[in-house]
């Protein structure tokens, strides 16, 4: 299951369109600059965030400002994964102002939520624009108090957030910026990016974010789509040293503290040379920044605090020692916010590969048929992920079959499983293809229940038998058409289901003995569906605290977040466990285990 597709931040659609019409209808467009971004900033930008703006003595940042990849056509855009407070958000603000000063275009600037969009628009971007006289004169008077739309001459920037309510797919955009990608669903980002597909003018796209989880969000984009440029600091080694590569949770291998003077400095462990992190290593055609995967679609940069002009080696060492002493999420924050590298704290992952290995019984075989088994199925678009289990006398459950059905006939696979395994109870995701799911449920009345996630006091609510369900819910259109539905509390059911692996309450047959052909990692191929797919899904979801409302209020709730891919088998596995919980024997276990 996933959230709705992202839409434009909305005061109203009409207000957005009026802004677009104004920008298109300007008859007295201001003269455009022909300066590069770096030269335009040097000529026009003085103060940013109450600090003197300068690129002097900052070769890593200056090189990014002077990167003309989007103008010379070598790359469609940029992807930057960074540490916090490295001045890269300021770079994006100035880049959009320069674009509007150089071109006539419309920019969509995306942020994770409305609060952040308004803060960036009103408290940061607008204040920077007001310090630049040439742009201040072009600012439209009726936009001065608008946090959603800001127009300069014949160019407009639209401040947007993921998941807004207004539908603006038809609004022409020439450039997209995704800021703080780590807090966005990668599927939503890619769907929004499609809005540039019909544009024949620019198609500029930029991604920028502090680091998040491995293989997810910004890390996915940088790894899969960019040329991944790393900063090589000068030392005696032929390729210099990438300082951020020498930070590990167990130790820092690039910072030394003089025992006599107390001085803290960077050094290269290989050649033992003292290192100035900002001094670039010249490597043939490259100086400092060098791509790991040349020729990729996007220009990619990794910008850690080790190459920041405002963060000293001593500060980095103190932060590391503090994180080491605190443990847990403190080390995660250190790597994400200071080293700019994706990291997940081990205590956030409920189910690990070691837990799954402990559940294996290689003497057991996968089954093709059975009697009185249970089914869970999660659907997404044209794919269905199915888990079949049987309940053992000791109240453990055994995996007996896994399947992925793809294409327009995917539901035919569920009909086949219902018959082959004589399924007693199936719990099937009711969305996205509700009609097909409803038809399946009606074909097996009282055996197939349609599932949806709701915040509940109870982990599982069967709508056909729960006396606590409100009368208006029982009278709802869907309940009248199909009474065989179940509401699941997402957090409770996922945690309980995953912990059944942790507690060795699931038995897994030989994980190398079940193969399937499916789309995996972007291509159709034969895979070990248990070893490769199920295990990857079960270990790529984390449990974390999320602030409720303003973080200053101190209220939090527990949520589950995906690491990279959408782990469909996590949900189908939980649905299958819910199906077993409908039996009287298992229901008693659930009541005893879940508070």
Image: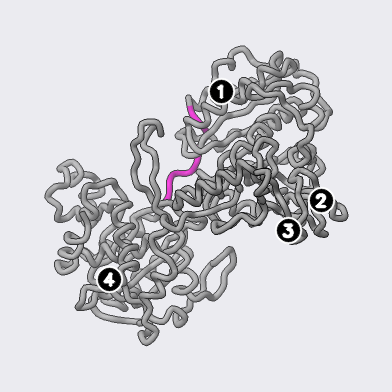
Q: Give me the C-alpha separation between circle 1 and circle 4.
A: 54 Å
Looking at the rendering, which quadrant does residue 418 occupy?
bottom left
Q: Earlier in the sequence, mark 3 or mark 2?
A: 2
Question: What segment carries the magenta color?
Answer: 2-10
Residue 377 point in image, percent of width and height: 36, 64
According to the image, what is the colour scheme of the structure?
Answer: one colour
Quadrant of the snapshot with the C terminus: bottom left
Q: Earlier in the sequence, mark 4 or mark 3?
A: 3
Q: Residue at x 37, y 85 (%)?
A: 365
Locate residue 25 relative to residue 447 in the image: left or right. right
Q: Give me the C-alpha separation between circle 3 and circle 2.
A: 18 Å
Q: Residues within 10 Å of mark 2 (few under 14, many from 20)?
A: many
Provide the residue designation for mark 1: 123
Q: Earlier in the sequence, mark 1 or mark 4?
A: 1
Q: Give me the C-alpha separation between circle 1 and circle 2.
A: 38 Å
Assign the magenta stretch its main secondary structure. Answer: loop
Q: Give me the C-alpha separation between circle 2 and circle 4.
A: 61 Å
Disc 1 secondary structure class: helix
Looking at the rendered image, the disc whose residue lies closer to the viewer, 2 or 4, is 2
Tag 3 near tag 1, CB within 8 Å: no
Q: Is residue 295 visible?
A: no
Q: Earlier in the sequence, mark 2 or mark 4?
A: 2
> Any mark on residue 374, and which?
4
Q: Relative to the observer, which residue lies in front, 213 or 305?
A: 305
Tag 4 near tag 3, CB within 8 Å: no
Disc 4 secondary structure class: strand
Provide the residue designation for mark 2: 281
Provide the residue designation for mark 3: 293
Disc 3 secondary structure class: loop
Q: Earlier in the sequence, mark 3 or mark 1?
A: 1
Residue 335 point in image, percent of width and height: 56, 50
Looking at the rendered image, the disc whose residue lies closer to the viewer, 3 or 2, is 2
């Amino acid at each position: 299951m996933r959230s709705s597709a992202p839409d434009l931040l909305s005061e109203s659609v009409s207000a957005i369109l009026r802004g677009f019409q104004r920008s298109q209808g300007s008859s007295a467009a201001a003269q455009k600059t022909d300066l590069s971004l770096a030269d335009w900033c040097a000529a026009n930008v003085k103060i940013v965030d109450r600090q003197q703006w300068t690129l002097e003595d900052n070769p890593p940042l200056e090189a990014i400002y002077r990167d003309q990849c989007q103008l010379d056509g070598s790359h469609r855009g940029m992807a930057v994964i960074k540490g916090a407070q490295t001045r890269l958000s300021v770079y994006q603000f100035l880049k959009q102002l320069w674009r509007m000063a150089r071109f006539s275009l419309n920019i969509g600037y995306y942020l994770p939520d409305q609060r952040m969009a308004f803060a960036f628009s009103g408290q940061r971007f607008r204040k920077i624009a007001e310090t630049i006289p040439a742009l201040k004169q072009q600012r439209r008077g009726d936009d001065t108090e608008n946090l959603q739309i800001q127009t300069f001459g014949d160019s407009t920037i639209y401040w947007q957030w993921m998941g807004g309510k207004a539908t603006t797919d038809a609004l022409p955009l020439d450039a997209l910026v995704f800021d703080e990608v780590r807090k966005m669903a990668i599927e939503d980002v890619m769907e929004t990016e499609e809005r540039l597909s019909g544009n024949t003018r620019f198609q500029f796209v930029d991604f920028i974010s502090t680091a998040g989880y491995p293989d997810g969000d910004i890390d996915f984009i940088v790894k899969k789509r960019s040329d991944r440029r790393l900063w090589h600091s000068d030392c005696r080694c032929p390729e210099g040293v990438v300082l951020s590569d020498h930070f590990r949770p167990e130790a820092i291998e690039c910072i030394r503290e003089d025992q006599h003077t107390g001085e803290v400095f960077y050094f290269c462990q290989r050649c033992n040379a003292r290192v100035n992190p900002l001094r670039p290593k010249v490597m043939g055609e490259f100086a400092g920044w060098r791509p790991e995967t040349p020729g990729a679609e996007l220009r990619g940069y990794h910008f850690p605090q080790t190459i920041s002009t405002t963060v000293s080696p001593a500060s980095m060492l103190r932060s590391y020692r503090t994180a080491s002493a605190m443990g847990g999420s403190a080390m995660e924050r250190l790597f994400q916010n200071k080293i700019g590298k994706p990291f997940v704290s081990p205590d956030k992952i409920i189910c690990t590969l070691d837990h799954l290995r402990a559940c294996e019984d290689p003497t057991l075989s996968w089954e093709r048929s059975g009697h009185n088994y249970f089914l869970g199925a999660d659907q997404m678009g044209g794919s269905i992920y199915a888990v079949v289990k049987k309940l053992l006398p000791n109240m453990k459950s055994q995996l007996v079959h896994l399947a992925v059905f793809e294409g327009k006939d995917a539901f035919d696979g569920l009909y086949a499983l219902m018959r082959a395994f004589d399924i007693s109870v199936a719990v099937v995701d009711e969305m996205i293809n509700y009609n097909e799911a409803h038809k399946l449920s009606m074909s097996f009345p009282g055996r197939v229940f349609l599932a949806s996630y709701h915040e509940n006091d109870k982990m599982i609510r069967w709508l056909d038998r729960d006396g606590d369900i409100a009368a208006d819910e029982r009278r709802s259109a869907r309940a009248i058409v199909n009474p065989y539905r179940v509401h699941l509390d997402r957090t409770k059911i996922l945690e309980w289901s995953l912990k059944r692996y942790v507690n060795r309450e699931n038995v897994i047959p030989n994980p190398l003995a079940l193969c399937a052909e499916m789309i995996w990692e972007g291509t159709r191929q034969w895979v070990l569906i248990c070893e490769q797919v199920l295990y990857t899904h079960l270990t790529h979801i984390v449990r974390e605290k999320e602030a409720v409302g303003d973080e200053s209020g101190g209220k939090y709730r527990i949520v589950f977040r995906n690491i990279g891919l959408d782990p469909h088998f996590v949900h189908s596995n939980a649905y299958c466990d819910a199906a077993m919980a409908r039996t009287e024997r298992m229901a008693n276990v659930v009541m005893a285990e879940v508070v």
